[in-house]
Amino acid sequence: MAKYNIALCIFLLSLLYITHGKRKSNEFDVLIFTQVWPLTACFVWKESSEKHSCSLPKRDEWTIHGIWPTRYNTLGPEFCNKSLPFNPSVLAPLESQLKENWKDVHNGSNPYSFWGHEWNKHGTCAVVIKELNNEYNYFQEGLKLLDMYNMMDVLAKANILPGQKYMVEDMLEGIQGVLNKRGQIMCVHNEKTGELYVNEIRICFDKALQLVDCDGIREFPTNCDRSKQITYPSSVPHDNRVVQI
């Protein structure tokens, strides 16, 4: 009888583990809304090949990278639903806004490739949220979030302006002071000069799309070197191949 009970317990625990694993596969804790500084993104793109040039927004503005459903301390979930393939025609009413505010700086590339990647990788996981439940809503909501939480405005309110250098802690505290929530700052490193550039700023939302602290996400609060000042560039570093469109 005891052996039977032990075997039954093991079976039930195994079943619970399997069920739990399946249930958790597409679940997430927070949504990360990621904005990118196009001037830094252009630098990264050009550094990867001498043949690369950039297409920048008409104004110096932070643009959208994506809305990423995310589990704490890891990446993903990703590519959650292959039955929801990207359809460029759905975005026709938003296309002019997306070309400026959800911009691919890779000059010469098809913008649909960037948007398609974000939808297939992240949007198909976000559809469990009512406001993000289809392709159109996912991208429209990104534009709304940019209007409300544009980092150009947030940083300016904290007296953090392009063309200056700051300690990352001061930038993080500035964001927190304006939004009353902790965000994340990501940097890139210029291997030739040793300089660090602000690349992305990430803020987090719960499943009700309420702003929350980003504590617990991977690399929180920053990958930047806290002992060095980081540059918030006002032009593309070593800019010699930029195409303004």
Image (tube, rainbow, N blue to C red):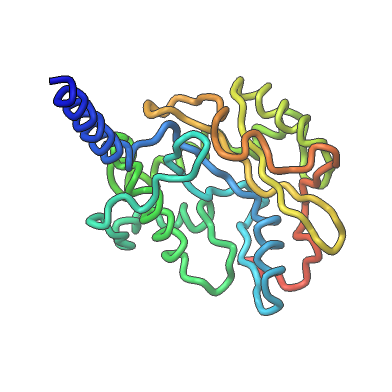
Describe residue 9's horizontal placement relative to residue 236 as left or right: left
Residue 95 as seen in the image, left or right of residue 236: left
For residue 51, what is the image quadrant? bottom right
Query: x and y percent of residue 9 in the render?
Result: 21, 25
In front: 22, or 30? Answer: 22
Figure quadrant of the N terminus: top left
Quadrant hosting residue 157: top right
Q: Percent from the top left, x then y, of residue 104?
A: 54, 61
Measuring from the top left, give residue 86's x and y in whole percent: 32, 59
Most extreme residue toward the bottom is 51
The answer to whether residue 158 is above or below residue 83 is above
State the residue at coordinates (47%, 65%): 111
Residue sitting nearer the eye, 140 or 138: 138
Q: Is residue 30 above or below residue 76?
A: above
Q: Quadrant of residue 125?
A: top left
Residue 128 point in image, percent of width and height? 29, 37
Task: Tell how many labels.
Answer: 0
Q: Which residue is at a point 52% across and 36% down the rendered structure image?
A: 73
Quadrant of the image for the C terminus?
Answer: bottom right
- At 67% from the left and 51% from the top, the residue drawn is 60
> Is the residue 118 above or below the residue 72 in the image?
below
Residue found at x 46% / y 54%: 98
